Amino acid sequence: MTTQQPNTPTTVTSKLSLDPRNVFYGIIILLLAGCSYLLFRNWQLTNQFTHERNLMRITAQNNQAIVDQQQLTFGMKTFSWAVRNALLQNKPGEISEYFNALVQHKGVQEVLLVDSAGKVTLSTNKKNEGIVFASRFPVYLLQKEDIYFNKKAVYELSAPVTAPNKRLGTLVMFYKPTVVMPASTLD
């Protein structure tokens, strides 16, 4: 008697099936790929943040310089008018009071009044009174015909003091600006 037994298809089990070792290695590969992606993305974001921070710092410094220039040149213009009036009325004590009041403000380092011959007649630093301006300071500050602003680490400003028909002298101010975004606070 022959009995026929149903043919059951034989399944070929592959080596990649649910073998615990293969699952373990697959998980490790996925974790390594995920960690690599996260490290790369962190590096990208750090570089982007550094770039944007530096751009923001440069923009803030440029904006500060522009605003400082506008305010200081306007202030020098009106200050030169006040000094001109005091010079025309022959009141050097009044100019000295102006200088002392101005130098008390943060950032103002020194204010000088130079006569038309190039000699410092008044200064907030008494050591500089009576000296020839060119012996300690740049001469180009005296040669400007309008309000002059030079954006250095310490701003240089000069303004001619003029009477209707002649130049009475030159006002010179050295101003150290307040730092808007110091480098140490953002690093």
Image: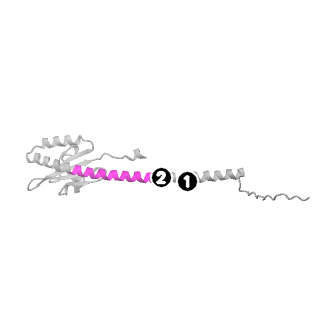
Residue 86 vs residue 45: left or right? left
Which amino acid, by three-letter code, is at mark 2?
A: Leu
Which amino acid, by three-letter code, is at mark 1?
A: Tyr
Q: Residues within 10 Å of mark 2 (few under 14, many from 20)?
A: few
Cβ–Cβ under 8 Å for marks 1 and 2: no
The boundaries of the magenta stretch are: 48-73
- The residue singled out by tag 2 in the image is 45
Residue 131 visible within the image = no
Residue 165 vs residue 99: left or right? left
Mark closer to the chain start, 1 or 2: 1
Q: Can you give x and y, in whole percent of width and height, for residue 130 in the image?
A: 18, 47
Task: Identify the image quadrant of the N terminus.
Answer: bottom right
Where disc 2 sits, the SS reads helix
Residue 84 vs residue 44: left or right? left
Pick whichever, 29 or 184, lies toward us.
Answer: 29
- The residue singled out by tag 1 in the image is 37
Pick whichever, 87 or 7, lies toward us.
Answer: 7
- Magenta stretch contains residue 69: yes
Question: Quadrant of residue 14 in the image?
Answer: bottom right
Residue 167 visible within the image = yes
Residues at marks 1 and 2, CA–CA distance in whole angstroms: 12 Å
Q: Residue furthest right?
A: 1
Residue 152 drawn above or below residue 94:
below
Query: Looking at the image, which residue is at 13% across and 49% down?
Result: 81
Query: Looking at the image, which residue is at 40% across and 52% down?
Result: 54
Where disc 1 sits, the SS reads helix
Q: Residues within 10 Å of mark 1 (few under 14, many from 20)?
A: few
Pick whichever, 138 or 10, lies toward us.
Answer: 10
Q: Can you give x and y, in whole percent of width and height, for residue 2 in the image?
A: 90, 59
